[in-house]
Structures are given as C-alpha cells and as structure tokens.
Amino acid sequence: MSVGIDEISFYTSNYYLDLRTLAEVQQTDPDKYYEGIGQEKMGMAAPDEDVVTMAANAALPLIERVGTDAVSTLMFATETGIDQSKAAGVYVHRLLGMNNNCRVVEMKQACYSATAAIQMACALVARQPEKKVLVIASDVARYDLDSPGEATQGCGAVAMLISANPRLLEIDPEVGNHTEDVMDFWRPNYRATALVDGKYSTKIYLRALKKAWENFREVSSLAFDDFSHFCYHLPFSRMAQKAHQHLAKLNKADLTPEQIEGQIEDTLLYNRIIGNSYTASMYIGLTSLLENCKQNIAGKKIGFFSYGSGCVAEFFSGTVVAGYEKYLHRSEHKAMLDEREEVSYEKYLELYRYPDPRDGSDLTIEKVTTGRFRLAGFNQHKREYVAS
Ligand code: CAA
C-alpha cells in the first residue's frame, strides 16, 4: 500500500503589491527584486483575513468533495500562531463543519512544520488505511518596513489530503534530516514581525540542504540522477535556484545550467507572484509544478527540501501518480490569481498597519475579503470567525 497526497488546494489573498511599486518608493532598481531575489508580487492579507480564514478557504474544496466525516485528524502547520494555547485548526474545524470525532492539533517549527505534519499524517494513515488526514499549512510572512526582508513578504495557505493509495503523490518512507540550534530567523512572542539575520539565514539554508541530503543518501537508494524535479522551501525564488545549483554541484551532476534550471522552474511560478508563505511555500511550489509542467510527469521522482529556520531541515522523495492531472484544481487557482487586485503603496501601508489588537481591545472588522471565510472582529479577547 502507498501513502501520500491525494488532493491539494491553495488560497492566497485577493490583494498584492507589485515589487516595482516598492522599488520605486525605495528608489531601488526593480531588477533587484524581479531578478536578484526572483520575486514579482507579494500577497497582502485583507484586514479580515488571517491564517485561520486562509486555511479554511484552502481546505474547502477538499472537504466539499470528500465530505465532513471523511477526515479523522486535522493538522495545522503555521508560524503565524494566533493563540498560545488553542490550535488555529479548531476554528477551521468549525468553519468547515467537520465531525466532532476528528482530532485537531497545531504544529510549529518555522517553515518546516507542514513537512512534519505530512510525515506524521502518513504514519497515521499507514496505521489505519481507511482514514484520511487533512494537513493545512497557512502563514502570513511579515518583516519590518524598510528591512531587507520586506520584499520577501507574502501570504498563503495550502490544504492537502493524506490518504492510502493517493491520486497525486506517493511519499517514500526514507527521509534525511538535519537539526541544529541556530538563530537565523525567529519571532519572539511579543513581536508581530520576524527577526532575521538575512545573509546568515541563506548560508544556513544551504548548509542544512547539504546535511539533509547526505543523511537522505545514507537511508535511500535514490541518487540525484533519479529525480526529474525538485521542490524547495521558497522564501524567495532565487533561494531555490541557488540551492538547486548547490545540490547539483555537490553531486557533480552532468547537466547543463538550463537542464538544472528546468528541474525547478515550474515550482517557482506561483511563489513569484504570491511571495513567501512560510510553511505553505514548498507545497504551493509542488502545486505549481503539477499544474504548470508541460510534460506529463506521472511516474517521475520528485525531491523535496523542506527548511525551517532555527533550524530543522528534511529531504524526502515522492513519485507522481498516473492520472494525477485529472485531480488538480488548476482552473480555480488560475482564476483566483488572475482576479487579484493590485494595491498602491499607500494601500499596502494601510493593510500592513491594520490594527491587530494585542491589548485585548474589541474591534469590528468590515467585510473586505473575497474569500468565503472571514475574521469579523475581536470581542472580549476572542477572535470571531464567520462564513461570508
Ligand atoms: N539587478 C539584478 N540583481 C540585483 C540587483 C539589480 N539591480 N541589485 C541586487 N541584485 C542581486 C544581488 O546581487 C543579490 O544576488 P546574489 O544573492 O546572487 O548575490 C540579490 O539581488 C539580493 O541582493 P542583496 O543581497 O543586496 O539583498 P539584501 O541583502 O537586501 O536582501 C536577503 C536579501 C538578505 C535574502 C533579504 O531578502 C532577507 O533578509 N530575506 C528574509 C530572510 C530569508 O528569506 N532568508 C532565506 C533563508 S531562511 C528561510 O528560508 C526561512 C524563511 O522562510 C524566512
């Protein structure tokens, strides 16, 4: 029996800022963003959106298909936690009308935790193959204004149904891990934006890739040449390009630069216009590959490098299942991305600065999002979510 991803759907906000606009205000060459970091647009959450509403919007098409009773566990991965105690997924469970016998838990380890959730979901399904597990990764990437990280903000959520005999991707049990206590990117409880040592974080990312790959090679029979495509954690697209060149060099790959680029380029398309979505980014990258690769990649091996600052990294592999192209949400994703609204720099600042009460004040938020679920406000320290 195989276990893996049966269905995948993502959501991002209706608003985006074009990085040309940011470059103009900052009097920076736009090519620094378009070429240098490989990003064109960044998603900005509406005032009535957060990780919960984005997650519910991402998961809705899956639950509509399989029904509210089909899922035994909901795992919610995020580094934009909204509560120290209550799992954000419990709100999603209610918004989607899921069965009270479905357990819910939240996972945290920076951008890595969705991968931990998937591995644990695969283990649960291997134990009870008739059950399905819903893994949702949802994040809003926020850095300080005028900091080097600002252009790498973004937001998005991805929902994946993990099942036996999956229709999209069979996940192999062998994984390579690397964990190391480093301070490259973190967000203390009292801060709304991340602290990051940018250049150092890119070095640690590459070091963790080497270490995780070496560990993978010890446990798996697969070598670099066995993979047709690679999905990387995507803080910005250029990071994946650098990482893949690094891995190809480590393996003395006999490929042209174009062939190396061709192994990742379809994974980058959505990220370039959404921005970093932390835990969701690598899986939105997988969606981008499955939905945009011109060749049929059924039967091909995909390599995955998941990285969470701090840091925990994992290299794992999967095989694309024959017929996968029939089970994608390509047209819905395209429509969602095409219908987004570009915002001015002033509007971007307004969205960035929208109040996020941390002192317990009450707040009513008017309806802005075009998504199905929204955050209606804060009342007596409680977040109030509704379907719109
Ligand atoms: N035309 C073309 N390219 C240009 C250019 C121009 N006019 N101007 C600059 N560039 C190039 C630079 O040469 C550079 O390329 P290389 O990296 O190949 O040398 C690139 O654009 C970026 O320029 P800088 O290095 O000057 O950029 P910066 O220092 O202002 O910011 C950054 C880069 C430090 C990565 C910053 O974006 C940042 O801090 N980002 C947040 C942290 C991050 O994403 N880290 C990634 C690893 S950690 C992780 O993955 C977890 C996570 O999700 C956060």
Image (cartoon, rainbow, N blue to C red):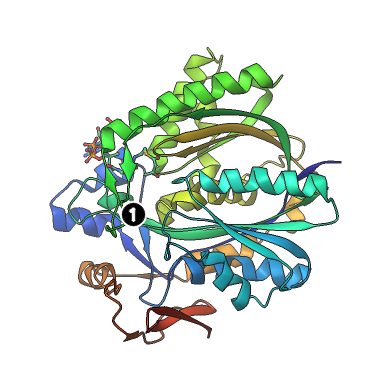
Which structural element holds mark 1? loop
Determine whether 361 is above or below 333 in the image: below
Determine whether 339 is above or below 327 in the image: below
Q: Is residue 302 visible?
A: no
Q: Report the amino acid beneath label 1.
A: Gln
- Going 48% across and 21% down the picture, which residue do you hit? 210
Give whichever of 164, 87 is nearer the camera.
Answer: 87
Q: Position of residue 199 (x, y in %)?
A: 27, 33
Q: Position of residue 266 (x, y in %)?
A: 55, 43
Q: Toward which corner of the image does residue 130 lie, by quadrant?
A: bottom right
- Going 59% across and 77% down the picture, which residue do you hit? 95
Q: Position of residue 184 (x, y in %)?
A: 32, 36
Q: Position of residue 259 (x, y in %)?
A: 54, 26
Determine whether 301 is above or below 255 in the image: below
- Residue indicated by mark 1: 153
- Going 26% across and 55% down the picture, which residue do you hit? 20
Please indicate whether residue 117 sits to the left or right of residue 111 in the image: right
- Going 77% across and 52% down the picture, which residue do you hit? 163
Q: What is the quadrant of the N terminus in the image?
A: top right
Q: Is residue 305 visible?
A: yes
Please indicate whether residue 362 sits to the left or right of residue 105 in the image: left
Q: Toward which corner of the image does residue 207 lie, by quadrant?
A: top left
Image quarter for ligand 1 equals top left
Instruction: Give the crowd class for mark 1: few <14, some 14-19, many >=20 residues within 10 Å.
Output: many
Give whichever of 128, 319 is nearer the camera.
Answer: 128
Please indicate whether residue 185 sits to the left or right of residue 298 in the image: left
Please indicate whether residue 150 sits to the left or right of residue 239 in the image: left
